[in-house]
Amino acid sequence: MKNWLWLLSLSLLIGCSSNQHDLYFPQGEREVLGLQAFQSCGHENYQVLKEGQAGPYDHALIECGEHPR
């Protein structure tokens, strides 16, 4: 749980320093995993996808080249 709070704090810091991208703030385990996938690939920003598209976790894996599809 502490790790989740740390990730949320980090995403808030990123949100304050970025004006180029809409950021996604994790609210569940699946989203946190997506954020971690982005960070492990060196992505500074975690973008929001419009409704109807793949979820943020799927998007992170696609960006990292690890998505099974």
Image (spheres, helix red, strand yellow):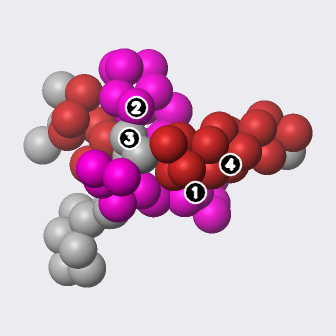
Q: Which mark is residue 55?
A: none
Q: Residue at x 20, y 79 (%)?
A: 52
Q: Is residue 46 left or right of residue 11?
A: left
How far apart are the two marked residues, 3 and 1, measured between alpha carbons?
12 Å
How far apart are the two marked residues, 1 and 2, measured between alpha carbons?
14 Å
Mark 4 lies on residue = 8
How far apart are the two marked residues, 2 and 4, measured between alpha carbons?
14 Å
Please tell me which of labels 4 and 1 falls first in the chain: 4
How far apart are the two marked residues, 3 and 4, measured between alpha carbons?
13 Å
Instruction: Report whether residue 30 is seen.
Output: no
Q: Amino acid at mark 4?
A: Leu
Q: Is residue 21 magenta?
A: yes
Q: Quadrant of the N terminus?
A: top right
Mark 1 lies on residue = 26
Q: Amino acid at mark 2?
A: Glu
Q: Is residue 8 above or below residue 37?
A: below
Q: Point out the frontmost of discs 1 and 2.
A: 2
